[in-house]
């Protein structure tokens, strides 16, 4: 039985939020879900298509709207907060919506959750910890202790996006300590899977190939990300929401470190293209080198383990999803690529 019977999922029409809604819908039929989503360019009603409206209600609105948030939260048992501006490259062009949604939006939600003593789970990112050196630059190839992010790693975000997420984490921590907010925080590594916006690395390259365009690798392609299937993230969040200790931070990751070049070559191989059929483009300013998560706390204290551990298989099914759902992304493709082209990316 779930501890919470009516949850609000902010950002539930975006990539990870909608996957979480599907996860709860399919596995916990007793739970009613209200999705609060502004439907920005990254939100899409179609991500919730086919779900019974008696169990999943979409409210189109802004998490910065105090009155709306107040009205919704007083009827719920818990808030799972995914809504955010999420793309680093966009934050370098215009940080404004990042500060507004990620900082002020989170502030609005925690104030209302405090008022009604409602359980709050804050979704955050490993990027708040900055980056790690590449393993080849570390003694012993970085296999020793302290070579991954842990819940005790210092906050040192690099981009407007990651600094806005770091700010929101700190607000949540302070509201727990000062006001007794019943909150937990999770910081996850890079997700992949269905419904991810085509501005992001993996879907951008898949849809480039599907639309006859050349895949684009930033800089040298040596940068490392720690990939996790979004379904494993959803199960981890559900576990923390129900069994996590109030006030605690849990890191979510599935030991999926890969450099970008390797990921792109695998996509090309899976799509029947030569491994070198891509071009190097301008690097991202301030580009973080490597992320890696130590999820020991989540594994040992809450018993979570990832299931989608075969990255090759996970990528294969993600590619199939983009092939089968061209209507979902095709209309956006030209504008997304035109924006990248302006920056030589
Ligand atoms: P996304 O950009 O795909 O979706 C964000 C959703 O939030 C969209 O549906 C959008 O409409 C909604 N939204 C934006 N501003 C809003 C506002 N002011 N009010 C209400 N709704 C608003 O993002 P994502 O990749 O699914 O990321 C979701 C969350 O997970 C974010 O908090 C992000 O920081 C975090 N996260 C993402 C990853 C990743 O790999 N994508 C990894 C770790 C953590
Ligand atoms: O680590 C968690 C974070 O992962 C989340 O907090 C963010 O919301 C999410 O967007 C993601 O951030 P990244 O910046 O790592 O993801 P992105 O998909 O933009 O890029 C992944 C890597 O691929 C990064 O090193 C930049 C590179 N890249 C990206 C694009 C779009 C390319 O080489 N080519 C590209 O075309």
Image (cartoon, rainbow, N blue to C red):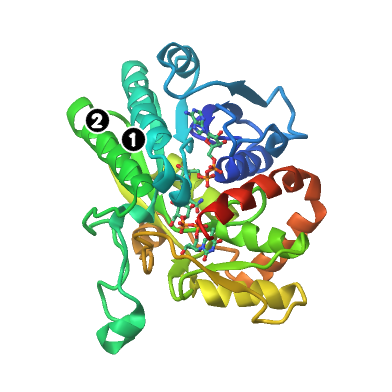
Given residues 83 and 345, the one toward you in this image is 345
In the displayed structure image, the side of residue 254 where residue 124 appears, left or right: left
Given residues 221 and 323, the one toward you in this image is 221
Give how far across and how far down residue 66 sits, in percent. 40, 15
Is label 2 or label 1 in front? 2
Gap between marks 2 and 1 measured at Cα: 8 Å
Please indicate, yes or no, whether residue 278 appears anywhere in the rendered image: yes
Image height of 345 relative to 223, above or below: above
Mark 2 neighbour density, 10 Å: few (under 14) some (14–19) many (20 or more)? some
Where does label 2 land, which residue? 175
Please identify the quadrant where the C terminus is shown. bottom right
Q: Residue at x 48, y 38 (%)?
A: 82
Sequence order check, earlier mark of 2 and 1: 2
Mark 2 and mark 1 residues within 8 Å of each other at the beta carbon: yes
In the displayed structure image, the side of residue 134 where residue 30 appears, left or right: right
Give how far across and how far down residue 250 sits, in percent. 35, 52
**Mark sitting on residue 221:** none
Mark 1 neighbour density, 10 Å: few (under 14) some (14–19) many (20 or more)? many
Give how far across and how far down residue 292 sits, in percent. 38, 67
Q: Is mark 1 within 8 Å of ligand 1?
A: no
Where does label 1 land, which residue? 183
Q: Residue at x 26, y 34 (%)?
A: 171
Which structural element holds mark 1? Answer: strand
Please indicate, yes or no, whether residue 197 appears anywhere in the rendered image: no
Q: Tell how many labels.
A: 2
Q: Residue at x 36, y 63 (%)?
A: 288
Give how far across and how far down residue 253 sits, in percent. 44, 61
Given residues 212 and 140, the one toward you in this image is 212
Please identify the quadrant where the N terminus is shown. top right
Which structural element holds mark 2? Answer: helix
Q: Residue at x 55, y 77 (%)?
A: 262
């Amino acid at each position: 039985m779930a501890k919470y019977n009516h949850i609000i999922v902010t950002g539930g029409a975006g990539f990870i939020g909608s996957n979480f809604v599907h996860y709860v819908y399919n596995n916990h039929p007793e739970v009613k879900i209200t999705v609060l989503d502004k439907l920005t360019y990254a939100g899409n009603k179609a991500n919730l298509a086919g779900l019974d409206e008696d169990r999943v209600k979409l409210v189109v609105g802004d998490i910065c709207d105090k009155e709306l948030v107040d009205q919704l939260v007083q009827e719920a048992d818990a808030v799972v907060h995914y809504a955010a501006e999420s793309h680093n490259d966009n934050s370098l062009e215009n940080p404004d919506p990042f500060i507004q949604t990620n900082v002020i939006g989170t502030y609005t939600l925690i104030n209302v959750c405090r008022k009604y003593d409602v359980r709050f789970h804050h979704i955050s990112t490993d990027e708040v910890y900055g980056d790690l050196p590449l393993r080849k630059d570390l003694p012993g190839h970085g296999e020793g202790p302290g070579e991954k992010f842990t819940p005790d790693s210092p906050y040192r975000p690099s981009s407007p996006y990651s600094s806005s997420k770091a700010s929101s984490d700190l607000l949540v921590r302070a509201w727990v300590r000062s006001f007794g907010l019943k909150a937990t925080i999770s910081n996850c590594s890079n997700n992949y899977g269905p419904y991810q916006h085509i501005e992001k690395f993996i879907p951008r390259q898949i849809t480039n190939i599907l639309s006859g365009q050349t895949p684009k690798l930033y800089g040298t392609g040596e940068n490392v990300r720690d990939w996790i299937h979004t379904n494993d993230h959803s199960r981890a969040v559900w576990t923390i929401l129900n069994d996590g200790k109030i006030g605690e931070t849990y890191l979510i990751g599935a030991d999926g470190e890969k450099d970008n070049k390797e990921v792109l070559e695998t996509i090309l191989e899976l799509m029947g293209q030569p491994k070198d059929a891509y071009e190097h483009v301008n690097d991202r300013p301030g580009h973080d080198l490597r992320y890696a998560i130590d999820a020991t706390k989540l594994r040992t204290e809450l018993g979570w383990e990832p299931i989608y551990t075969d990255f090759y298989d996970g990528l294969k099914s993600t590619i199939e999803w983009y092939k089968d759902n061209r209507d979902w992304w095709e209309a956006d493709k030209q504008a997304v690529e035109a924006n990248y082209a302006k920056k030589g990316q």
